[in-house]
Amino acid sequence: MSRIKELRASFDKKLDALEHQALAFEAQLTQTKDQAMQRLEQSKQQLRDLLKQVQGEVQRSKEMAEQAKTEVQAKLEHLQVQLALGKADARDTFEEQRAKTLKALSEFESIAEQKLKGAAFDSGKVWEDLVDRTSILEAEYEVLKDRFESEKAKHQGTLESKKEELLAKLVLYKDQLKAKREVVQAKADVLETDLRQGLDQIRAGVRKFFE
């Protein structure tokens, strides 16, 4: 199993991913669509900043062949271009950007794990940061995708009670997530299933909220 896949399969990173999704759902309920879009742009910028560090490590690496550097650099630059595209306010444009960015990210990760060599990569720190940044970005993309698909105009006054109910569920969910981080790794699979089911229930509520 590759280093990135190992990290994503780890108990801590699975819980991190669920927490990132919960925080993204919370933001969707408490922020305007423009503010939610800005969160996405911030996540993209954070990943771009990390990729600049990766680019520097690639250039400095003495363990990598020049051909390998060129291949990694090409995928890295393509991903950076996708991340640098401006906000997409229309649903079709948003979905197109989302699909292209996630595809570019997958392609970069694939070539990176094959070719990247050097102290920074061998230590695993770059991979940990990459998994964290991409997890946050994927969470922001996912909840915005749901919002684009289901959002319709409604009178705000009729929504406040439902919003408060969903926010209360999210508070309880995050408390549960924090507590279950302390449970032993042997129970990880069962806990992940429980937590994912809880998040799916909240997701269904958020979708209904915007319908």
Image (cartoon, rainbow, N blue to C red):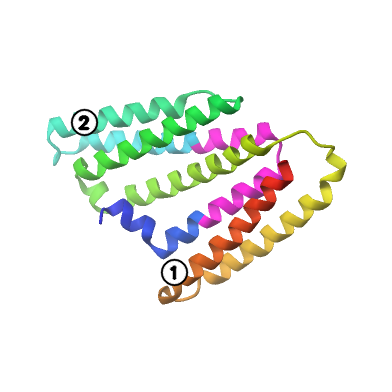
Instruction: State yes or no: residue 34 in magenta.
Output: yes
Q: Amino acid at mark 1?
A: Asp
Q: Secondary structure at mark 2?
A: helix
Q: Position of residue 110 (x, y in %)?
A: 27, 41
Q: Is residue 124 visible?
A: no
Q: Name the foreground residue: 84 vs 89.
A: 89
Numbered circles on residues, count: 2
Q: Amino acid at mark 2?
A: Glu
User: Any mark on residue 189, and which?
Assistant: 1
What segment is highlighted magenta in the picture?
18-43
Q: Name the foreground residue: 60 vs 170.
A: 170
At 60% from the left and 25% from the top, the residue drawn is 90
* Above or below, 147 relative to 189: above
Q: Secondary structure at mark 1?
A: helix
Residue 187, by quadrant, is: bottom left
Q: Main secondary structure of the magenta part?
A: helix
Q: Is residue 50 visible?
A: yes
At 66% from the left and 35% from the top, the residue drawn is 35
Q: Which residue corresponds to mark 2?
A: 71
